[in-house]
Image: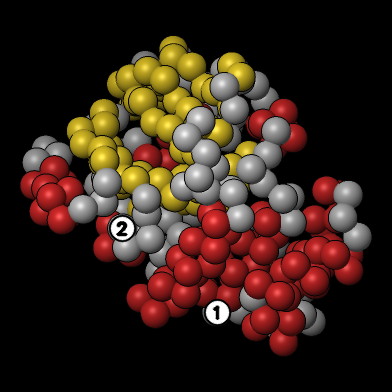
Amino acid sequence: MNDRPLLELRAVRAAYEQITVLHGVDLAVSAGQVVALLGPNGAGKTTTLRVAAGIHPPSSGTLLMGGRDMTGAAPHDLARKGVCLIPEGRGVFPNLSVRDNLLMMTFTGRSRDEVEEVAFARFPVLAKRAGQTAGTLSGGEQQMLALARGLATDPAVLLLDELSMGLAPLVVGRLYEQVTEIARQGVAVLVVEQFAAAVLDIADHAAVLVRGRIERQGDPDEELRTELSALYLGSSQ
């Protein structure tokens, strides 16, 4: 794992109109690392991902990619630099078949065969469902398709928002096994999760966001796990 962060947020503040939701967030993700961003609803987790993907501009602070200042860069510029966001809610086209969802990723320069080969090797169930309409897949299969689409861009940084949302624990476990494998290939992975148990077993580093501030970060050890409930409960007002 490379110690130099591929993605870094320094003292990032962000607001919606006059309401500040991030109050000086510092966060770094290196190549080959899985960082879990945890916290209760409304803590600012998704906003952090949106800033990292260039979708929401920070009101102050710095966004770095590979040490280069990318603050204020447009989403498509960050995408060209290798940032891929898979938003909450799967991010697939429900009225298109699995194959056509993957076909749309050929804009990356890969051929249809290459995109499908990578997707079906990682998620064999998608090969069996190739002609099926994406909206009729199970929730777990839709999430696999969303991941497969994202990986077709050959990302350097993968941003995942609530991967476990609405899925059975067994399915979530399998998905996070794939996330671990993706990180092993040198991708920097930042995962937002409300349910810490879903991701802490595979995370290399964890940060707990409460009311727009990182209250605790470090190794996902027993001490952090013990503190989590107090941090979450202490955030409710």
From the viewer's perspective, is the residue at label 1 or at label 2 nearer?
A: 2
- Measured as percent of width and height from the top left, residue 23 is found at 30, 21
Colour scheme of the rendered structure: secondary structure
Q: In the rendered view, would you say 185 is above or below 166?
A: above
As rendered, which of 135 and 141 lies closer to the eye? Answer: 141
Residue sitting at 61 percent across and 79 percent down?
137
Residue 217 position by quadrant:
top left
Residue sitting at 31 percent across and 58 percent down?
200
Disc 1 packing (10 Å; few <14; some 14–19; many ≥20): few
Q: In the rendered view, would you say 210 is above or below 88?
A: above
Residue kind at label 2, given as amino acid type? Leu
C-alpha span from label 1 to label 2 = 25 Å
Residue at the bottom extreme, as displayed: 128
Q: Secondary structure at mark 2?
A: loop
- Measured as percent of width and height from the top left, residue 142 is found at 59, 70
The label shown at residue 200 is: 2
Q: Secondary structure at mark 1?
A: loop
Residue occupied by mark 1: 138
Residue 144 position by quadrant:
bottom right
Residue kind at label 1, given as amino acid type? Ser
- Measured as percent of width and height from the top left, residue 203 is found at 37, 54
Residue sitting at 21 percent across and 36 percent down?
216
| Residue 117 placement, left or right of 169 | right
Residue sitting at 74 percent across and 35 percent down?
80
Q: In the rendered view, would you say 142 is above or below 206?
A: below
| Residue 120 placement, left or right of 157 | right
As rendered, which of 89 and 48 lies closer to the eye? Answer: 48
| Residue 124 placement, left or right of 172 | right
